[in-house]
Image (spheres, rainbow, N blue to C red):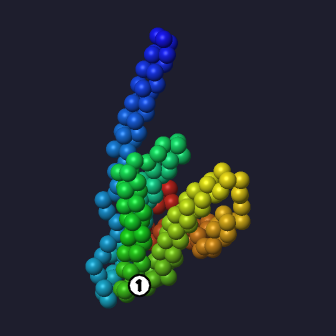
Amino acid sequence: MKLCFSLMIIFLLGACSYQESTKEASEEIVLPTSTFSSSKNNAVIDEKEIKESIKTYLDANEDLLNTSDQFEEMMDSDQQLTKAEAKKLEQLNDLVKENDRNFSTYISHNTLPEGYKKESERISRFITGSNQILDELDQAIDDMVERMSEGDFSETEIESLMNKNEGVNGREQKKIENFLDDKNIDTKAFGRKS
């Protein structure tokens, strides 16, 4: 009887401890407070401003990805997200889309300095595409895990997803990084120090 009672106390303490650590982990995840935004429309953008805009967009994306990684770590450790955490994750996904949409609108509705239009569009396509792939890959993996538990598995879905966005690859990233270096745009994107 004492052994059973002792085991029950240990189990309850362990469960309370797990709940506490999960709560602490979720409290540590803070959503970034800023994304790229601009109210400019049909304006002529000078070189200084476009450099700052590219930096802001890329840095905001990097912050959003880092926050997303924290949620991934929680889910990979088999922790169930609380309703509050799930809501935060949904808000994070909305911020990623907002950041991409705002930058795309900004570069398409304004006149950029010579030499910046093509590369700004490349950056926008690459980042937006990689964010879409990550989102779709996450969903595909969840679906695959569910189907695997039912005994159904298909690698072709993952392969088709990876081949879907050809503009997201190492060559395109290298072109973007070369552009950032050529224009002296200091950003923390792509693992750079800012």
Q: What percent of the width, then of the height, locates residue 15?
A: 43, 30
What residue is disc 1 on?
108
Q: Residue placed farthest to the front in the image?
A: 1
Image: 42 above or below 57: below
> Residue drawn at (46%, 58%), measured in percent from left and top?
65
> Residue drawn at (50%, 47%), measured in percent from left and top?
75
Residue 29 can be seen in this image: yes
Q: What percent of the width, then of the height, locates residue 127?
A: 49, 69
Label 1 crowding class (10 Å Cα cut-off): few <14, some 14-19, many 20+? some
Viewer-side residue, 3 vs 74: 3
**Residue 39 location, quadrant:** bottom left
Q: What percent of the width, then of the height, locates residue 83?
A: 38, 51
Which amino acid, by three-letter code, is at mark 1? Ser
> Residue drawn at (52%, 63%), measured in percent from left and top?
135
Q: Secondary structure at mark 1?
A: helix
Q: Residue placed farthest to the top in the image?
A: 2
Q: Quadrant of the C terminus?
A: bottom left
Viewer-side residue, 129 vs 179: 129
Residue 193 can be seen in this image: no
> Residue drawn at (42%, 20%), measured in percent from left and top?
9
Q: What percent of the width, then of the height, locates residue 36?
A: 35, 69
